[in-house]
Image: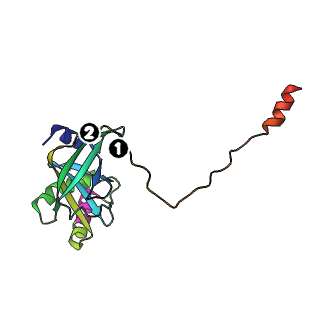
Amino acid sequence: MDALVEEAAKKAAVAWIAVSARPAKLVWCAWLGGALLVVSGEGEQTLPGLPEAATVEVSLRGDHGGRIVTFDAEVSTIRPDDEAWGELVTQLAGKRLNGAGGAEDLARAWAERVERGSCSVCRLTPVGGTAPMPDDSQAAPPRPTTATRIPRRPFRLHKVRGAAKERRS
């Protein structure tokens, strides 16, 4: 595994994940056991197609928003009856901000949702090397929308003409 990927992932609380041809989405994650763990589904963040995907593209950014590294990751799901569940998911629940109840309660709720098929806990294991950094900014144009806003007229505290006449006299 690339040392840059591991170091950036250990410090990351969020990652940009692109599933298939969809635009990348920002999700919270945690680096545990040599992989990024992501929870998605009912009551959590949405990342359509993640449990079914074989690989995804992951981008990690630094404290100031600049991209540090982009890499491909192999997707595997963790089920409550897996050995890794007890070891990793309780730690993941402890890292969850604003979780309802304690880590054990949250892990139990995730297990119930996974059994119902409304939630998934995915392990994203880095494969291959890192993608080269692009030469351009990679800025995307705004997405088309029907939303419009009529700009307001500028606020004027007083009439400029009247004040100019008073200064002349």
128 within the magenta span: no
Q: Are marks 2 and 1 in contact (CB under 8 Å)?
A: no
How many residues crowd around disc 1 within 10 Å: few (fewer than 14), some, or many (20 or more)?
A: few
- Please report whichever mark, 2 or 1, sits nearer to the chain's N-terminal start: 2
Q: Amino acid at mark 1?
A: Gln
Please state the horizontal and vertical placement of residue 7, each as a whole percent of the image: 20, 39
Residue depicted at 17% across the width and 60% down the height: 54
From this viewpoint, which residue is outermost toward the bottom?
A: 116
Query: Residues in magenta?
Result: 102-110
105 within the magenta span: yes
Give the residue pinned by disc 1.
138
Please state the horizontal and vertical placement of residue 69, each as a whole percent of the image: 25, 41
Residue depicted at 48% across the width and 59% down the height: 145
- In the image, taking residue 123 as reference, residue 143 lies left or right, namely right
The disc label shown at residue 133, or none: 2
Please state the horizontal and vertical placement of residue 19, each as a whole percent of the image: 26, 58
Element type where label 1 sits in the image: loop
- Quadrant of residue 41 within the rendered picture: bottom left
- In the image, taking residue 155 as reference, residue 150 lies left or right, namely left
Please state the horizontal and vertical placement of residue 12, each as a whole percent of the image: 27, 44
Residue depicted at 23% across the width and 71% down the height: 117
Q: Main secondary structure of the magenta part?
A: helix
